Image (tube, rainbow, N blue to C red):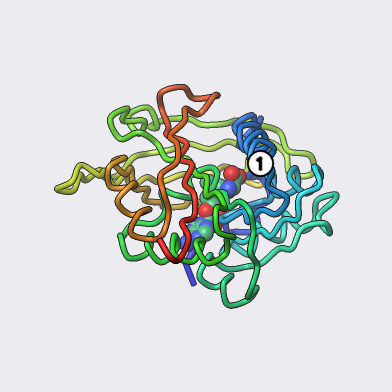
Amino acid sequence: MAVPDQAFDHPRLAEVYDALEGSRHDLDAYMAMAAEFGARSVVDVGCGTGCLALRLADAGCRVTAVDPASASVRVARSKPGARQVDWVVGDAPSLVVERPGLAAEMAVMTGNVAQVFLTDDEWDRTVRAIHSLLVEGGRFVFETRVPAKRAWEGWNGPGADVTVPGVGRVSDDYRVTETRTDEHGDVFVSFRSDTHFHADGTTLESHSTLRFRELGRIEQSLVRCGFHLGDVRDAPDRPGLEWVVVATRRSLHE
Ligand SMILES: C[S@@+](CC[C@H](N)C(=O)[O-])C[C@H]1O[C@@H](n2cnc3c(N)ncnc32)[C@H](O)[C@@H]1O
């Protein structure tokens, strides 16, 4: 199973994740797409603290939500309405084993999830697993940042600074530690985040690497793993910066 970053798997960091993220207007687009596609069952891969899974369940969808970070899933399970969601600690391939015959109508990856898979092999295994979790014609929707926009150039420096009930003031800052571009133009960005808990003076660090994939390579991988690239949309809250990819599961006979 995938090994998640501390940012999601350290209990203290998972507890303050939602507060540091702030408003989640980014999820509105996914709620709208679930309605547009008439999806009554959804798999949320990399559900984190469960913000979207809970909204979907509240709207009447049957939701299975999976994430390898047990601390984040613990936070999700503690939220109001959490009993309506089937929470699983794991990743897409382990979900295939744990929930055989799931047959969902839509699978989603929000936030950075599609960018955490650094090798083609890891990504393909995940996309193939999602293929087998969906009904024929089911949608796989995910967002990924456009490499040419070089978002990481704006990441160095202070991030959020919030007061969390029961925890006190929490702030974070980021430092990009390495960028590397492969022969196809995909960019790998490593960064460090430090989260400061001002009440007791603790600082917790987390290290991450994200892969910024070129659209052509995304399409090739989807086709290789049993999908059609249906549509590439704009993220309404970050116009021009991200691709929101809508893929459709092909029939096994195509
Ligand atoms: C930036 S968070 C986004 C969480 C959530 N989707 C959201 O929008 O709030 C990225 C999530 O990807 C999860 N993750 C890391 N590796 C993963 C994998 N191999 N499969 C699924 N999720 C993974 C992390 O644990 C983390 O919860």
Q: Quadrant of residue 51?
A: top right
Q: Residue at x 65, y 32 (%)?
A: 28
Left or right, 155 with respect to 19, comes to left
Query: Mark 1 CB in 8 Å range of ligand 1?
Result: no
Q: Quadrant of residue 94?
A: bottom right
**Residue 177 or residue 229, whichever sits in front:** 229
Residue 67 seen in the current view = yes
Q: Is residue 181 above or below residue 89?
A: above
Residue 7 seen in the current view = no
Q: Quadrant of the C terminus?
A: bottom left
Disc 1: which residue? 34
Position in image of residue 38 (x %, y %): 69, 43
Q: Secondary structure at mark 1?
A: helix
Left or right, 57 with respect to 25, comes to right
Q: Is residue 19 above or below residue 240?
A: below
Position in image of residue 40 (x %, y %): 73, 50
Q: Residue furthest left?
A: 183
Q: Residue at x 36, y 51 (%)?
A: 209
Position in image of residue 57 (x %, y %): 78, 49
